[in-house]
Image (cartoon, grey):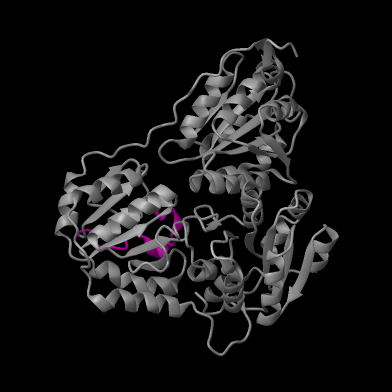
Amino acid sequence: MSPDTITGADLVARRLAKAGIRLAFGMPGGEVLALVAALDRAGIRFVLTRHETAAGFMAEGVWHATGAPALLVTTIGPGLTNAVNVIANAHQDRVPMIVISGCVDAALAESYTHQVIDHGALMRPITKARFRAQSGTEDIVTDKALAIALKGRPGPVHVDLPIMVAEARQPDRPLLVSRTPEPGRPADLGPALDLAARSRQPLIIAGLDVANTAGSEALTAFAERIGAPVLTTYKAKGVLPPDHPLHLGAIGLSPKADAIVKPLIEWSDLIILAGYDPIEMRQSWRNPWPAGKPVIDLVAEALPHGMHGASLTFEGDVAVALRELTAALPPVGATWPSGELAAMRQSLKAAFAAPNHGGWGPHQVFATVRECSPIGTVASADSGAHRILLSQMWPCEAPLGLIQSSGFCTMGGALPLAAGHAFATRRHTLCFVGDAGLEMVLGEIATLRDHQLPVVIICLVDSALALIELKQRQMQLPRIAVDFGATDFAAVAGALGGHGVTVSSTDELARETHAAFARDGFTLIAARIGDRAYEGAF
C-alpha cells in the first residue's frame, strides 16, 4: 500500500480506535478480511470466537469493563444471521454496539445470490440505525454510527461495508476530531422539585439506565438528600452500596420479593423512577401503583410500554436530572419510620438466605462462592432458575457487578459476558450458568483456553430446564421436553485445556473456588444440585 493512500476499511478502523475501542470480536469471512487487517493496523485486536452470538456478548462484556462501545464483526449472510440474538439483546439491554458486516457490492447483488440477503431489513427491528458505507463516506458513516449508539438510550447500530468499499485505496486524509454526544439535559424540573419537597415517604426504583458510575453517584446523593429508600432491578444492582442504610434490595422476577416490597408502594407518597424500564420486570409489575399515586419518571428516552403510568416524565440523561434535583432541594433527612426500612431489608435478606440446617443446593452454592470470592469480583449470570435466586442473593459493591441478559433474558450469554470482561481486565471473573445454558456455548471454552482467560465457571447441574419444569408443574402440565442427559463437564474442561471438577458439598466447593482464584486460565466447577432444587426458592 502506498504511504499516501489508505483503504476504506482503514478509515472505518481509525474512527473506531479513536472512540476507545481496542477489541473486536467475531468470525472472519472473505468479505471482511480487509477490515480485519485494517483493525489490526489501527491497534484494535480481532478476537476469533466460535459463534457470532458469543462474539457479541464478549464485546458487551468489554463495554461493561471499559465503557468503550462494543464492536462485533460478521461476514455476509449466515455470519450476520447468527448474530441476531445478541444484537436484539443489545437493543433491549442498552448496549452501545457497533455491528459491521461484510457484503457484496450493490451491482453484484443484482445478479449474484450466494449468501446474499437484505441485511438492512434483517436489522431494522433490532437496531437504532442502519448504514451502508460508500466510498468517501466511510469515516462519516462510522462517526454517525458511534454517535447514535451512544446517545440517549444506548443500543446497537449496524453498518454494511461492501467489499469494494473496504478494499478501495484512496488518498489519506486527516483524522477529524468528532465530539462525543453531550448528555441530554431534561426539561424544566420545577414540577418534580415541588413534589419531592412535599414528600414525606418517597421511594426510589432504579433501573438499568443508572447502572454506571455517574448514575450511581448521582442516585446515592439524591436518595440521601430526600431520605428515600432504593429498590433496584437486577441490572441496576450495585448502584447503591449493599450496606447503605437506604439500600433495600433487588426486584424483578421473584414473586417472593414482590410480596415483601410491594407494601412500600402503597405506603409511599411519591415514587421516583430513576432510569427504570419495566422491560426487566415480570407481568406482576404491570400497573403496580394506582392512577392517583404521584410518580416522577426520569428516563433516558421515553418509550410507550403500557406497563405503568407517571404523573411527570422527564426525558434526558438520568444522572444529570438527579444531580439537578439534588442541588435544588434542601436536605430532608430520614422521613420513613426508623425501624420500618431496616425490618423490610432484613425480611428480604432472610427470604433468600441459605437454610440454617445446612444441606446442599443452589442457596449453598451461591453463598459459598460469594464467601470464597475476592470482594469486588464481577460475576455474570445466565438465564434460568439460578439467575432469579442469584440476583436476589448476590451483593454488588459497584454498578454492573452482576452482568446478565436482563431485558431479553437469552440463554447462553453468561460465559461470553464473563470472557469479554476478563479480556478487558485480565482479572478473574465469575460465570454462573446452568448445564443447559453451558451446553449452548461449550465451544467458547476453547476461546478461554486460547487466550488464557481467568474465568471461573460455576455450573449448576440438574440435567433439566428447571425453570420451565417449575412452570409446567404450576400450570399442572405434564413434564415434557425439559430433561436431558448428564454431561461430564469436568472432563470437557480438561479436554479443552482447563481445570474441571465436580462437587457436591460446600467443603468441596469452597476448596475448589479458592483454588480457582489462585489459578491462571479457566476453571469449570460443576455443582450437582439435584432435581427440583429451586422449589420455593424465589
Q: Is residue 276 visible?
A: no
The residue at the far right in this view is: 495
Residue 514 in the image: state x and y as whole percent. Answer: 68, 71
What residue appears at the point 54 percent right and 65 percent down from the top-left corner? 375
Q: Is residue 134 visible?
A: yes
Front position in the image: 298 or 305: 298
Q: Is residue 32 left or right of residue 260?
A: right
Residue 166 in the image: state x and y as whole percent. Answer: 68, 20
Q: How many labels does the image show?
A: 0
Q: Say which quarter of the image contains residue 492.
A: bottom right
Image quarter where the N terminus lies is: top right
What is the magenta range? 276-292
Front position in the image: 240 or 187: 240
What residue appears at the point 70 percent right and 39 percent down from the top-left corner? 26
Q: Say which quarter of the image contains residue 161.
A: top right
Q: Does the magenta stretch include residue 277?
A: yes
Front position in the image: 502 or 413: 502
What residue appears at the point 71 percent right and 72 percent down from the top-left corner? 512
Above/below status of 352 relative to 492: below
Q: Is residue 211 magenta?
A: no
Q: Main secondary structure of the magenta part?
A: loop
